Image (tube, rainbow, N blue to C red):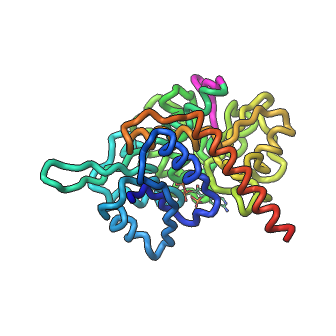
Amino acid sequence: MKYLYLFGYPLGHSISPAFQNAALRACGVRRVRYVKNPMPPDKFQEIILALRAPHCLGANITVPYKQTILPLLDEVSPLAREIGAVNTVVKRANRDGSVTLVGENTDAYGFMQALRARRVNPRGQRVAILGAGGAAAAAAYALAEAGAHEIILLNRTLARSIELADRLVQKFRRMGLAINDWDALGKTQLLVNATSVGMSPHPDASPLPPHVLLAPHAVVYDLVYNPPMTRFLREAQAQGARIVGGLEMLIYQGARAFELWTGKRAPVRIMRVSAARALEEMIRAADAGHKG
Ligand code: ATR
């Protein structure tokens, strides 16, 4: 048996194994399983050992290691290098029998595909991103590439916003950038939550301070997918915003990763159905747990 791993910590919320295994089955890839491999911070270095093991075919990297993994890899694709975050590792077999660990980023693609599917075009728009980690970096990069007019970065840790803004300004010199300008929220056409705030098991939290007024007709996009209706989305909808949940991005980033690992076309529809079912089951089990 060979394995594709999901590395991160904690991983309780993740439904990636459900839809990746469904995709492997649907494409006739036998004797390969996608499994969670939670690595607490004191075991972070072991990710590389696990990746180099012959039975490992590749991996996804998630919170909180998307940025810290970069220097440990043999190669990083130009896109992942520009974003400064890796969510997928591909193992390239060399002629001399050695293996090269290549870091890729499929989050930016997944982020944009989900917006396209909802016919949201950020060209010329002022957008705000909550967060400044790996997911925020991918979202910011995708929005800048798509022609956003101005990006406002809002994050708890100022130094990380500054670092991300520095990276963006080098590539997108003509785009406007602002940091921690919370007052601008009332004038942004698209607001993205790229923090982990509101994610299960803490669904009562919101990444927005109380009583923030959004722009009329704003699009509000939460990268959190568990729960599907976060407090952030619920409150935005109550203000009249159009909302986009995180499940489509999860599926599209996973589909692109699947294609990189297997060389096969990802069965996106099958992945979507399995993801939705797994999420429902996880929520039902959590509810039963609370009641029990
Ligand atoms: P990822 O690579 O998946 O984006 P990450 O790098 O750990 O994960 O980033 C998580 C983001 O959520 C960060 O922007 C983080 O803010 P800090 O940079 O200040 O750590 C944000 N975040 C996580 N928990 C938070 C909380 N309780 N309040 C506000 N922001 C939070």
Q: Where on the picture, by quarter, is residue 178? A: top right
Q: What residue is shown at x 53% (from left), y 53% (from top)?
A: 133
Q: Is residue 198 left or right of residue 103?
A: right
Please say whether residue 206 is one of the residues in the magenta stretch: no
Please say whether residue 121 is one of the residues in the magenta stretch: yes
Residue 138 makes an appearance in the image: no
Q: Where on the picture, by quarter, is residue 111? A: top right
| Residue placed most toward the observer, 278 or 180 | 278
Q: Where on the picture, by quarter, is residue 281? A: bottom right
* Ligand 1 image position (quadrant): bottom right
- In the rendered view, tell whether residue 59 sits above or below residue 121: below
Q: Is residue 129 left or right of residue 146?
A: right
Principal SS element in the magenta part? loop
Q: What residue is shown at x 42% (from left), y 38% (from top)?
A: 259
Image coordinates for residue 233, horizontal then vertical, percent: 77, 43
Residue furthest to the bottom: 42
Q: What residue is shown at x 45% (from left), y 58% (from top)?
A: 5
Image coordinates for residue 223, horizontal then vertical, percent: 63, 45
Image coordinates for residue 278, horizontal then vertical, percent: 67, 51
Residue 267 makes an appearance in the image: yes
Quadrant containing the N terminus in the rendered view:
bottom left
- In the rendered view, tell whether residue 207 sits above or below residue 202: above
Q: Is residue 59 left or right of residue 252?
A: left
Give, as a single range, the part of the protein colored magenta: 119-128
Quadrant containing the C terminus in the rendered view:
bottom right
| Residue placed most toward the observer, 119 or 248 | 248
